[in-house]
Image (tube, rainbow, N blue to C red):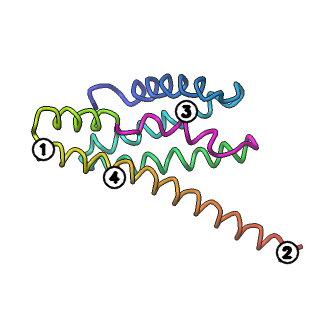
Amino acid sequence: MMDFPLAFHFFVAFIGTLGFCLLFHVPLRHIAYAASGGGLGWITYVYLTGTGNSPVVACFLGAIVVSLVAEVFSRAGKEATTLFIIPGIIPLVPGAPLYYTMREILDGDFSSAASMGAQVLFMAGSIAIAILMSASVTRLLVAVKSSFSAKRS
């Protein structure tokens, strides 16, 4: 995947996420922000897998980036975080490994299918955990900030 520069990966992920933004009816004023979140998450994934990290770790950290960017954009644009997370996470969804898992099952190679299927489950789980962790940390920081500002008032 690292045959192409990261800017190319960002552009392609941006365009792919842009399509899902249109599909999910993201308001026009937020489409560029949501698509850039998907691009940033994807280049995080590509960079980390290119440096030798496992796809599960790279997917987790890519989802953290998407989720944190979505939190920032949602606060700046006064919109729901899911408006930015759902299309932004699309490039990280393990579609190709799931396809290869199904192909291995149909070919009768169940050991390879189990290995690939476990990787798919771990990648999907890492996306979910990353979004939960990011949202929880953000809510905690907002609660602490509002607590300190209430004490000062």
Cβ atoms under marks 4 and 2 closer than 8 Å = no
* Mark 1 to mark 2 CA distance (whole Å): 62 Å
Query: Residue 148 appears at what percent x and percent y?
Result: 77, 73
**Cα distance between the residues tagged 4 and 2:** 41 Å
The residue carrying mark 4 is: 57
Is residue 113 placed above or below 30 in the rendered structure?
A: below
Quarter of the figure with the N terminus: top left
Labels 1, 3: front one: 1
Which of 59/53 is in front?
59
Dot 1 corresponds to which residue? 110
| Magenta stretch encompasses residue 144 | no
Q: Which of the marked residues, 1 or 3, is nearer the chain's N terminus?
A: 3
Quarter of image, res 43: top left
Residue pointed to by mark 3: 36
- Amino acid type, mark 4: Val
Q: For mark 2, what is the residue?
A: 152
Verify CB contact (< 8 Å) between mark 1 and mark 3.
no
**What span is in magenta?**
77-94
Amino acid under disc 3 = Ser
Q: Which amino acid does label 1 sit on?
A: Phe
Q: Is mark 2 on a helix, strand or loop?
A: helix
